[in-house]
Image (tube, grey):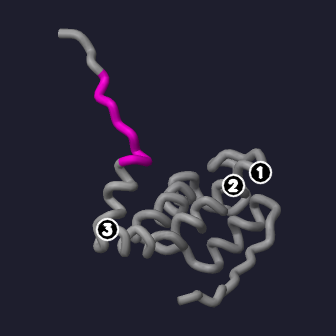
Amino acid sequence: MSYKPVSYHPKKKLENELQDPDFKKAWEALDDEFAALDALLAARRQAGMTQEQVAAKMGVSQPSLARVEASLGSHRHSPSLEMLRKYAAAVNCKLEIRLIPQHS
């Protein structure tokens, strides 16, 4: 038996899924969580640090930090403001939270 890769195009798949109004609503509801995760990961990359290094500066274990990063897209656990402050300080950033008016 030989290996035959299956073609998969995630962007096309997402485009198709977004045609379903229920899926689209659920997807858009996660937008802020994905943005928060992107911000954390970008700050850590900018600092040139690993999870282990950030965790050490925060005074937490690496698995705890991994759960914080993973939780933002999963709804399992939302990190506290204190945890986000520690993360920001560890990667030499300032935590800033903004509320932006929605346009209907």
Residue that extends furthest to the left in the rendered view of this protein: 1
Which residue is nearer to you in this view: 91 or 17? 17
State the residue position of label 3.
23
Which corner quadrant holds the N terminus?
top left
Secondary structure of the residue carrying tag 1 is: helix
Whether residue 56 is visible here, answered yes or no, is: no
- Image quarter for residue 58? bottom right
The label nearer to you, 3 versus 2, is: 3
Type of amino acid under label 3: Phe
Residue 32 lies, with reference to residue 69, above or below; the image says: below
- Residue 3 versus residue 77: which sits nearer the camera? 3
Distance, label 3 to label 1, CA atoms, is 33 Å
**Magenta segment includes 6:** yes
Number of residues whose C-alpha sits closer than 10 Å to that of mark 3, classed few (under 14), some (14–19) or many (20 or more): few
User: What number is the disc on residue 46?
Assistant: 1
Q: Is 3 left or right of 80, judged from the image as shown?
A: left
Callout 2: SS: helix
Of the numbered discs 3 and 1, the one sitting upstream in the chain is 3
Which amino acid does the dot numbered 1 rest on? Gln
Picture disc at residue 75: none
Answer few, some or many: residues within 10 Å of disc 2's Cα (few below 14, many 20 plus, some between 14 and 19): few
Q: Earlier in the sequence, mark 3 or mark 2?
A: 3
Tag 1: Cα neighbours inside 10 Å, few (<14), some, or many (≥20)?
Answer: few
Which residue bears the numbered disc 2? 42
The image position of residue 15, as x and y in percent, is 39, 55
Q: Amino acid at mark 2?
A: Ala
Nearer-the-camera pick, 14 or 56: 14
